[in-house]
Image: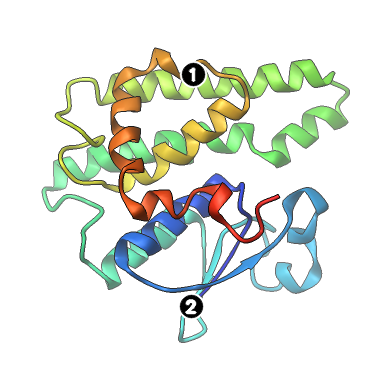
Amino acid sequence: MKLHGYFRSSAAYRVRIALNLKGLGAEHLPHHLRKGEQCAPAYLAINPQGLVPTLESDGGTVLTQSVAIIEWLDETHPNPPLLPKDPLRRAKVRAFALAIACDTHPVQNLKVLARLRELGLPEEKVQDWAAWVNREGLSACDALIRDEKGPFCFGDAPTLADLCLVPQLTNARRFGVDVSAYPRLLEAEAAAKALPAFADAAPEKQPDAE
């Protein structure tokens, strides 16, 4: 398999964690987002959105969107499972994951922040926007799992929820958010980061880290 990504991309980070948990190897192909390499014609030919990650399977099939990629990995390599068997629990895990992957991360990603700068917002306001988005999303996520038994987001093993949470907390810190306000999220993060699969997927561990 080939994973197109960028060391600081939280979406690519999620997929790296999933690959590690499943014990799957992949050739990592970096695309420097700040240099616009994701907009190169050759890359747009496989991912018209010009986003990372993109996963190319051994059979040549191209998959985009991190959550879809992770669910495909989970369905084709079911151990360890990243979604509960119980339909209701599975829906709860997905809801938490999508609160981050659909409603928080995209609103503070590089593309959106670049557009805010193009519209004339001063850098201080751009950074304030990103911090606000993270606080809003993480506050809701902390409430969603406040009564869930840990140490992970949903019980004693990592799920799709944890794969989305850990990279988002990394983003939040980068934008100066005081994450101590989210004790339940930090509990889950600590449990996750104690696992090699999470630790080895961290941005600073990647070959293209700056």
* Point 35% across, 66% down: residue: 73
Q: Is mark 1 on a helix, strand or loop?
A: helix
CA distance for labels 2 and 1: 36 Å
Q: How many marks?
A: 2
* Point 50% across, 79% down: residue: 61
- What is the quadrant of residue 173 in the picture? top right
According to the image, label 1 marks what residue? Answer: 136
Q: Which of marks 2 and 1 is in front?
A: 2
- What is the quadrant of residue 105 in the picture? top right
Amino acid, disc 1:
Glu
From the top left corner, tell me how far across and down residue 57 is, in percent.
47, 78
Amino acid, disc 2:
Met
From the top left corner, tell me how far across and down residue 166 is, in percent.
42, 38
Position of 149 with respect to 177 (left or right) is left
Image height of 132 relative to 36, above or below: above
List the single residue furthest toward the bottom.
Answer: 59
Position of 52 with respect to 103 (left or right) is right
According to the image, label 2 marks what residue? Answer: 1
Looking at marks 2 and 1 on the same chain, the residue that comes earlier in the sequence is marked by 2
